[in-house]
Amino acid sequence: MLTLCLDIGGTKVAAGLADPDGVLVHTATCPTPKSADAEQVWDAVEAMIRDALRAAGGAVAAVGIAAAGPVHLSSGTVNPINIPAWRGFPLRDRVAAVVPGVPVRLGGDGVCMALGEHWLGAGRGAGFLLGMVVSTGVGGGLVQGGLPYTGRTGNAGHVGHVVVEQHGEVCSCGGRGCVETVASGPWMARWARANGWNAPLGAGAKELADAAAAGDPVARQAFRRGAGALAATIASVAAVCDLDLVVIGGGVAKSGPLLFDPLRAAVAEYARLDFLAGLRVVPAELGGDAGLVGAARLAGL
């Protein structure tokens, strides 16, 4: 029987059906409503669930949810930074009400990305893995021994809010100097514009990557600066957790060597402890499906 998997973020809601091997046999997406009304956001999620149930023939074995966080596993509630309408929203119970009698598992979207990559992507065989998504924000999750490492509340691995600049910019989380304010796509583009990048109107991370690939010195420096912040985060988390692999996905990671060349060089500079000598940093393989695949994996654990 199929598993229903959901990936709910600030930009889009994705739903899928996965077979027991993790193959997605159905996927669909819709934009996340930009509404202050929690029920309007939920209506979009419920519609995706019901469409997937119809595609499954009306029955699924389990449901896995990858949700933007913070999440709170004990209560099944979520407080996504990028979905302001949901504060203490009882997501697990609301989903369970649509699929009565079916087990429902909730996890953070970063944890599910990491689970997906560990199961079927670039993280296969890793003992202790950090998965990172570098896109409009910076997210992350930890997988140890093939299982999600969630911590006390379910938010372990929320690495986008590791502080890399003590007196840096104010972050969307309310803190200051988080790696997200240096290395996420919008923040890199913002820094580049402030430092002389002659950007087209509405230009973002993709245009910044194009400019860097064409040799624009400010754009290239923006990538080096972002890579340095990511490397400092990776070295810190690796030292605390004794990681053996870091898998990085997301839109910014699609820039390839523009990001990964300075990133690996900076990781080698920062991660100098002998037990970190084998630490590897690799691109993700599952693309935008990693959260759905990881949610399916979560449902089956």
Image (cartoon, rainbow, N blue to C red):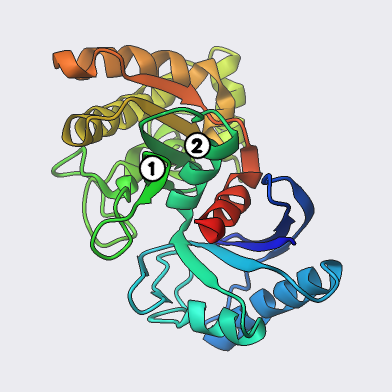
Q: Using the rendered image of the protein, determine whether residue 52 is visible from the camera's viewpoint.
A: yes
Residue of label 2? 118
Q: Please provide percent x and percent y for residue 238.
A: 24, 30
Q: Is residue 134 above or below residue 291?
A: above
Q: Please provide percent x and percent y for residue 147.
A: 40, 47
Left or right of 87 on screen, residue 102: right
Q: Please provide percent x and percent y for residue 26.
A: 80, 56
Q: Mark 2 touching mark 1, by CB under 8 A? A: yes
Q: Amino acid at mark 2?
A: His
Q: CA distance from mark 2 to mark 1?
A: 8 Å
- Secondary element type, mark 1: strand
The foreground one among 126 and 256 is 126
Q: Amino acid at mark 1?
A: Val
Left or right of 284 on screen, residue 159: left
| Residue at (76, 74) in percent of width and height | 59
| Residue at (50, 77) in percent of width and height | 92
Residue of label 1? 143
The foreground one among 4 and 285 is 4
For the N terminus, the quadrant is bottom right
| Quadrant assignment, res 89 | bottom left
